[in-house]
Amino acid sequence: MARFTAEHNAPVIQLFEKFTLPQGAKQVTVPKVAQATFAALTDGVDMTATADIGMTTTDLTTSEVGCKFILTDKLVRQANDDAFAVVGRMLGDGLARKKDGDGITLFASLSNQLGGAVSMELINVAACIAFARANKFPEPVFIVHHPNAVYMCMTSLAIMPETAGDPLAGSDAERAALLKNFYKMRFDNVSLYQDGNIAVVSGQTYGYGAIFSQNCFAYLESVGFNREDERDASLRATEVVVTADYGVFELDDGYGARMQYQIDAPASNN
């Protein structure tokens, strides 16, 4: 039986606000309004000041990605496994990893930065959550970081965290299936996820995760996964092609912060 390269490719996109590009549309425009401010009134005196709705918009669009395998008839005949099933899984995993990486790339572009070249201990996680509360991140709020950073948080715990019943995953069966392997715990009403696709910054020992509201980032989908098999008789082969048409975006820079923490491998000989 074929062995597959291990993947860690699902969590980030599932935590973004999701939009669908309608048929016939080229973009989705997402509006945001400012706050309303009330003023004291005097009895018998008309209100003269008016409020400004302060609307801003963000335009979202999609772009295509794709991958192709060519399976020769001879390979299909001689393979012990179903070659079409094997490459089908590889293509699905690869697309999920691509989307996840695109989402992670957005973390480093957030203007707010927390942490530093230090371990992500619980006291630091609590401070990041306090930052989110003080800056009014809308619920739900998530933290995503590398498993090695999450390990340091877990080893610094003096209490048992809540490790079951993630409310976001529980609200959607498909999302629950995708997130269950990456959910670590829930602390102070913030769910913590681990993602092995977060990379070490070149020449350093730290990487960037993030704490963010679901309203901070957006995932826009036109085509999530499209597979086509095309027969090439003269080549005696079949092309297996998968494409997708999507985009990931930062919707509101004020609703997120990048978290810089050490993600080098912890010692296993203590």
Image: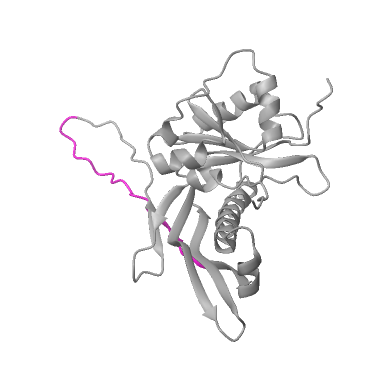
Instruction: State the image coordinates of residue 88 (x, y, percent, origin top left).
Output: 55, 60
The stretch of residues the image draws in magenta is 43-63
Q: Nearer the viewer, residue 197 or 233?
A: 233
Q: Which of 10 and 86 is in front in this view?
A: 86
Q: Which residue is drawn at 39% across and 62% down?
A: 21
In the figure, residue 67 lies in which quadrant?
bottom right
Instruction: State the image coordinates of residue 105 (x, y, percent, origin top left).
Output: 63, 52
In the figure, residue 152 lies in which quadrant?
top right
Instruction: State the image coordinates of residue 222 (x, y, percent, origin top left).
Output: 42, 63
| Apparent side of residue 194 relative to residue 142 in the rendered image (left or right) | right
* Colour mode of the rendering: one colour
Residue 59: say if magenta: yes
Count of marks placed on residues: 0
Q: Which residue is drawn at 66% across and 30% down?
A: 150
Residue 31: say if magenta: no
Asked if residue 213 shows in the view, the reply is no
Q: Which residue is situated farthest in the top direction here?
A: 158
Q: Which corner quadrant holds the C terminus?
A: top right
Q: Work out whether 209 lies above or below 60.
A: above
| Apparent side of residue 115 relative to residue 265 in the rendered image (left or right) | left
